[in-house]
Amino acid sequence: MRPIIVGISGASGIAYGIRALAMLRELDIETHLVLSAGAKMTVNEVGMSAKEIEALATHAHNQENFGASIASGSFRTAGMMVMPCSMRCLAAIAQAAPYNLLTRAADVTLKERRRLVLLARETPLNQAHIQNMLIATQMGAVIYPPVPALYARPASIEEMIDFTVMRVFDLFEIDAPVNLPRWSGMPDLTKPLLMRMKN
């Protein structure tokens, strides 16, 4: 499989990006990581240093390095995950106004018509946030707020994170190395209703 770009921006939820890197490493998929300056300030959420997070990636790029391989469309990738995606990062992507390598790589991903998944992390949302999500969607990005799927009955925060990462991997047709329950439907509730109607 072609390399995957993982962007981690400065919003709560850095654990999603870290878990994605760990899973991709387990699957032996080449990764290119960009940690934004804001992300480096949120590493205390997980008790890891920026260097420890960067060590999970095959390649870690400085956010100021606009000469990096992932800044060009001629460097072929399977796409990019921004996990989490701050509202500032989203705005830069939606308006095609990159201010660092993370947002430049996302811009390149869109212009090359590759898969871009944004774990937009903010609540509540104001009008500008919603408009930027719409614009990004119209350009081909997938907005994926990390909302837990409670039907899976997660037993821990780790399982909630794994489920979200698994669903993001689905969007890239990557089989995540976790065995979590997926939605398999509900019992057919129409049968008793039809029986009641007949009576």
Image (cartoon, rainbow, N blue to C red):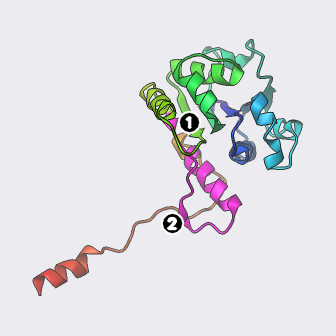
In the rendered view, would you say 115 is above or below 180?
above
In the rendered view, would you say 62 is above or below 86?
above
| Nearer to us in this view, 129 or 71 | 129
> In the shown orientation, is residue 72 left or right of residue 96?
right
Q: Could you tell me the amino acid type at mark 2?
A: Tyr
Q: Residue at x 58, y 48 (%)?
A: 146
Q: Which residues are magenta?
A: 142-168
Is residue 78 among what the camera can see?
no
Q: Is residue 157 magenta?
A: yes
* Dot 2 alpha-carbon crowd within 10 angstroms: few under 14, some 14 to 19, many 20 or more: few
The image quarter containing residue 108 is top right
* Dot 1 alpha-carbon crowd within 10 angstroms: few under 14, some 14 to 19, many 20 or more: many
Residue 67: image x %, image y %?
75, 12
Q: Earlier in the sequence, mark 2 or mark 1?
A: 1
Task: Write down the residue under mark 2.
Answer: 151
Q: Residue at x 78, y 17 (%)?
A: 64
> In the shown orientation, is residue 56 left or right of residue 127?
right
| Nearer to us in this view, 62 or 42 | 42
Q: Residue at x 70, y 42 (%)?
A: 17
Tally the numbered discs.
2
Q: Could you tell me the amino acid type at mark 1?
A: Val
Task: Write down the residue under mark 1.
Answer: 117
Judged from the image, the secondary structure of the residue bearing numbered disc 1 is strand
The span from disc 2 to disc 1 (Cα, nearest Å) is: 23 Å
